Amino acid sequence: MADPVISPPEVVFTSPLEHSRRQLEALLEVSEAIAQQRDLPALFHDLAGRLHSVIEFDFLSLVLHDPVRNVMRLHILETHIPTEKMAGTESPIEGHPSGWVWQTQQPLVIVDVDDETRFPDFMPRLREHNVRSLAIFPLTTAQRRLGSMGFGRMMPQQVTDTEMQFMQRVASQVAVAVDNALNFETSQAYQSQLARERDRLQVLLEINNVLITSREVPELFRGIVKTLERVIHHDYTSLALLDSQTGLLKVHALDFPGSQSFIKQEITVPRDTSPSGQAIASGQPFLARGADIDRYQNEIMRSLRTSGVQTMCCVPLITHGQAFGTLNVASRRLDAFSPQDIELLQQVAAQIAVAVENALAFKEIEALKNKLAEEKLYLEEEIRSEFNFEEIIGESPALKRALAQVELAAPAGTTVLLLGETGTGKELFARAIHNLSPRRDRTFVKVNCAAIPSGLLESELFGHERGAFTGAINQKIGRFELADRGTLFLDEVGDLPLELQPKLLRVLQEQEFERLGGNRTQRVDVRVVAATNQDLAKRVSERAFRSDLYYRLNVFPIQIPALRERAEDLPLLVRYFVQRFSRQLNKEVEYIPADAMDALTQYSWPGNVRELENLIERAVLLSPGKELRIPFAELKSAGMAPATDPSSSSASLTSPASLASPMATLEEAERQHILRALKQTQWRIAGPKGAAILLDIKRTTLQARMRKLGIRRPV
């Protein structure tokens, strides 16, 4: 039984003028309610309370026409009469009062239900609930006919002309509100559908990327599971492959979080005792729920049922028209795996089938790959931290602490302030926060506050209107608007001019601003991640930075460690950069001498990871063969010279005294490198023992570089 919502009105006698005034007030209140509500139940609940002061009724109903089923459906019933919940009740158009109103677009007034001979199938229902009189009005907009709105009373009563006019006005306003609410629901449903389609297409793309980068079945499987679990709820996944020799199914790479007791690398089961065998035989997806799963008695199925699995779906892997295995997913939910999920699984299975077939066919070839190819294949997984934050590489405790804070802050919408020296990778941390947040499907926009002139920064951040200043010939959208519902990264926020800081503070607090030269307030939903290498607290004390803005930015500070604080990560970073720049520069650098690694580890790295990256790029460019040659002259710290034999290839690049020299330019480093090669070959340029061969470049190229760098043989 529904709880009472509308209290019976008290009888109050008012003059006609007073009644008209109250009706007008009620119409205004109806307009306010419509403007404030998009939810139909809440709107009707609000309307019932407002209208009850000017008109007598015992229930208020909303009946809408369903164009798909061509029926009238009761959506909302506001009443104080004890009755069963009737929302969702459907009735044919013919023989229903609301259907008649919808068809004729005329109001319907029934003074006494007992005297009404029309609608013989519907009248008994009203009498059962003691409804004696009824007034129904069409809900119609300029675009379409929606349904009807009804006022009911528990006693026979005529409806006056004044009441009719008032009810019709209310109905015309409610029609607009209902139309807006339905359009809003349709829009939301369409957006949700587009989001689901986008997610599913993203899944197919990511799985494709996994398949083209991996050939080992376990590795393929891990990538597939990680991608699928974001869009399809499931508790268990596996690949079943048919052994053509024995006719048995080998279930590979079982994944069943929370129930690891029976998980093995490979389990063999007969085809006829497995739903996978059914899917392979039919060539179609096979879905089993509840007791249907119990028909298949094997080790895996018994364990799954014991662990609470209620639904099993097996999708065949088919190539060349022949099924050779299945992709299997299972869930503890009885209603898991909709037709849309199964359709997506079929698309995924088509991708997996090709990849698995290739993986099995080329297994022997894969085993013969050389060491360099294997390192290239697995290097990314080897050097990344367990958090797997894109290109944030390292396993040191200091870095892990910072990444743990990123994981903590990312899901929330709070403002994050990244603190750290220059070159520590603050933008990578900002992107990681965005990618781990609910806003990851929206835009990530970055602004370097120090790189944009202060006169243009306001326009860059907030946009400007046409004619706002000289040269503003068009309207411009600012970075805050571009980042709406996404993330805005404010790099070097400590360099923000004082005159702009109040406007930034307002956006952070109120999420609103005006474009430069405009007077219309723009509202946005932006999550701000700021970064600085300055001591903002000190700048506040120096009155160079507003204290209120500082406190607003400093909600969740994350200190990014300097490279010298995570020295154990340096070998991982060096190997990563060597591999990356070898690919980019078409080099074949494979080895990093121990003395070079020691020298890099002992250096203090004031420029942090950015300095290391630039140094390794130059080193790879200058390395003639497979061994990395470090330009030690660029490492400014005199105390880090490696204790090595001067005759070794890497140590002979420079003298120890040169370690105290100023930072050399790339051109000077190249000039010194060529000079050392020429001295070593006694200024012989061409031939088997010439400098061109030693430097691994063409003779003409070497001569051109010598002319450009002003290198001449001494007289």
Image (cartoon, rainbow, N blue to C red):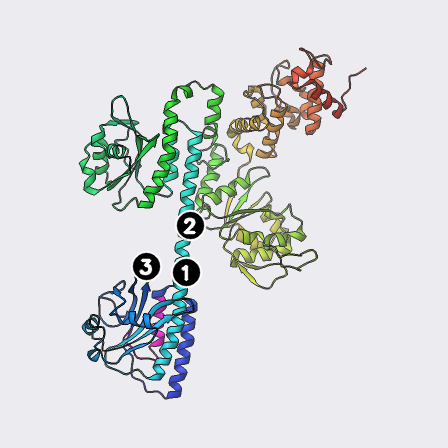
Per the image, label 2 sits on a secondary structure element best described as helix
Comparing 336 with 638, the one in front is 336
- On screen, residue 424 versus residue 6, left or right, reads right
Q: Residue 68, labelled with which disc?
A: 3
Query: Pointer 3: residues within 10 angstroms few (<14), some, or many (20+)?
Result: few
Location of residue 295 by image quarter:
top left
Residue 172: x percent and y percent? Answer: 39, 73
Find disc 2 in the rendering and name its residue: 194
- Against 78, is 267 above or below? above
- On screen, residue 558 versus residue 714, left or right, reads left
Residue, far top: 688
The magenta stretch spans residue 464: no
Q: CA distance from mark 3 to mark 1?
A: 18 Å
Q: Amino acid at mark 1?
A: Phe
Q: Quadrant of the N terminus?
A: bottom left
Residue 416: x percent and y percent? Answer: 51, 47
The answer to whether residue 386 is visible is no
- How many tags in the picture? 3
- Magenta range is 42-59
